[in-house]
Amino acid sequence: QARSHPSTPTHARAMACKGAIALAFGLFAAASGGLAAAEDVAETCADGSCPAQKARPGQAGVNLMQRAYMQSELGQASDTSGTDYDCDDDGVPDCGKWDYTMSMCNNQLMCGHRYKFPDGTLDQSCRCRRCAASPRTAQGDPKFLSPEDPKVEAPFKALGWGTFKNWADHMDTCAPWVMPRDDASIRNLLAYAREKGYKVRISGAGHSAGGIVTDGRNQQVLVLSLAEYTAPAGEWEFGLRDMPDGSKRATVNAGWTQFQLYEKIRPLGFFVP
């Protein structure tokens, strides 16, 4: 139950009747016209029988920019039937589901986090990426969008990781994000890009701000990542050498995360300085 606020008793009673909602959010929404009038909301609970809240299954955690809250007039159950969620217009929603394990929308190829007021859940903000590009451009080339699909006959082995966006998710582009798996795949991908006149940009984990990798405006740009790359056996994948001062020096696959590195060095008692 929300506590009454001395300056807005009617508003607080209405919120208490409808379920616990962040007071700051409620006041902001009221100021912007997003809330129903307090008197109208109060009337629905005049007899003391407020409808039970419908908690959505699987909802957990807090996003940095968007907080989940209990369902009420402010946040109804997700409606995934509109064009925001049916990307290929086949009547079946492709988006509208948040993956809490990976902290991203499911189906990254088609879906991205695009908040629209008054979205109440992360699921509701997982909308279609509308990247309508010609198949003759890098952004529309199916060999980059679905390289693992045997029907497209891509000349390289790679994972298509949707389209490039940075870690903070405020730079979200339509440039295909491709992750070749081995040396031969990198060579073949670069040869194919040169043949088609595409520009290849290199990305890490997506922590780069702004348009350092790409801003997505050039439809001939594709982004290459080594996140799925396995180097030839030996020091190029992982090596550990003794140094004159008694320390160790590691040589690591350029696509490795810190987690992968620590899996190797922690059992040996080492940290990254």
Image: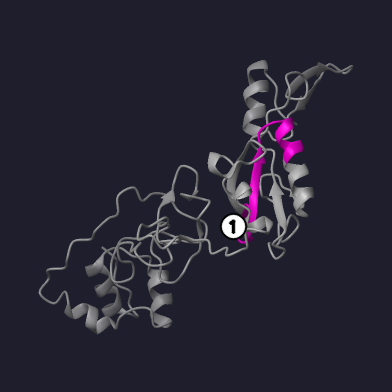
Res. 175 image quadrant: bottom right
Res. 95 image quadrant: bottom left
Question: Is 21 above or below relative to 98?
Answer: below
- Most foreground residue, 70 or 14: 70
Q: Dot 1: few (<14), some (14–19), or many (≥20) neighbours within 10 Å?
A: some
- Most foreground residue, 53 or 10: 53
- Most foreground residue, 177 or 61: 177
Residue 248's spot in the image, x, y percent?
79, 20
Instruction: Check disc 1 and report the residue beneath it.
Output: 169
Question: Is 60 above or below relative to 70?
Answer: above
Residue ID at (50%, 48%): 103
Q: Which residues are magenta?
A: 164-188
Residue 180's spot in the image, x, y percent?
67, 38
Question: Is 227 above or below relative to 146?
Answer: above
Give, as a three-letter code, the residue at label 1.
Asp
State the count of labels: 1
- Which quarter of the image is occupied by the C terminus? top right
Residue ID at (32%, 77%): 6
- Tag 1 secondary structure: loop
Residue ID at (24%, 68%): 18
Question: Was residue 35 drawn as part of the magenta stretch in this picture?
Answer: no
Single out the residue that lies furthest toward the right. 244
Question: Is 11 above or below relative to 180?
Answer: below
